[in-house]
Image (tube, grey):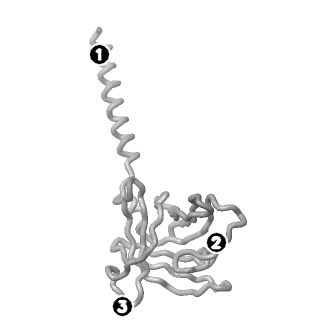
Amino acid sequence: MTKQLIRLLTVFGVASLLLSACASQKGTVTAASMDKQVRGKWVLNTVTFDGLPSNAKVTTVFSDIPYKCLEGSTWNLPSNNYGSYSISSTATGCTPGTQNIVYSVLNQGGVIMIQFKELLTGVKAKNVTEGYRMELASANNASMVWRAPVTYEGKTAYVVYSFSRR
């Protein structure tokens, strides 16, 4: 082999290693990296249903909140994990108000999840045993999507929460 060919193969080999290293780093999504993306103020734009037939009757989510009341709600998810969501809708069945929450992002069997517990006045987070856990399907500087699994007629379907950053 000539020196020029060896030099070309070496440059190609180094470039390949660098590209593969960058690609593997870019594809790595961790709970910690997603937690940083989740932090901030959000508006819940839509609640939709994936895998449910149009005649399925889903009326409430979370603490028996009509899902339509959550559309337009604002979510504050600060870095200390003590946040809130505020419902402003005055439509029939909606009760405007703010609910304090504690939230976290975690890895559950390779799936990044977001979970939160509603905090009642005077109750410490460690004493709240029930909450909500959803797949954190995506989160970036502009939008975030949660997917909550539900069982319908023996099959898994999803309630999909689509947010935009405020």
Q: Give the amino acid at mark 3.
A: Gly
Q: Secondary structure at mark 2?
A: loop
**Residue 143 position in % (x across, y down):** 52, 62
Q: Secondary structure at mark 3?
A: loop
Characterize the local packing of mark 3: few (<14), some (14-19) or many (20 or more) Cα atoms within 10 angstroms: few
Q: Nearer the viewer, residue 166 or 51?
A: 51
Number of numbered tags placed on the structure image: 3
**Residue 94 position in % (x across, y down):** 62, 84
Give the residue number, with chain letter if any, for mark 3. Answer: 122
Question: Mark 2 and 3 residues: CB-CB less than 8 Å, in contact?
Answer: no
Of labels 2 and 3, the one closer to you:
2
Characterize the local packing of mark 1: few (<14), some (14-19) or many (20 or more) Cα atoms within 10 angstroms: few
Which badge, 2 or 3, comes first in the chain's sequence? 2
Which badge, 1 or 3, comes first in the chain's sequence? 1
In the picture, the disc for residue 58 is 2
**Residue 59 position in % (x across, y down):** 64, 75
Give the residue number, with chain letter if any, for mark 1. Answer: 6
Q: Is residue 40 above or below residue 52?
A: below
Q: Give the amino acid at mark 1.
A: Ile
Q: Quadrant of residue 50?
A: bottom right
Residue lying at 59% horizontally and 58% vertically, measured from the top left? 155
Residue lying at 69% horizontally and 61% vertically, measured from the top left? 53
In the picture, the disc for residue 115 is none
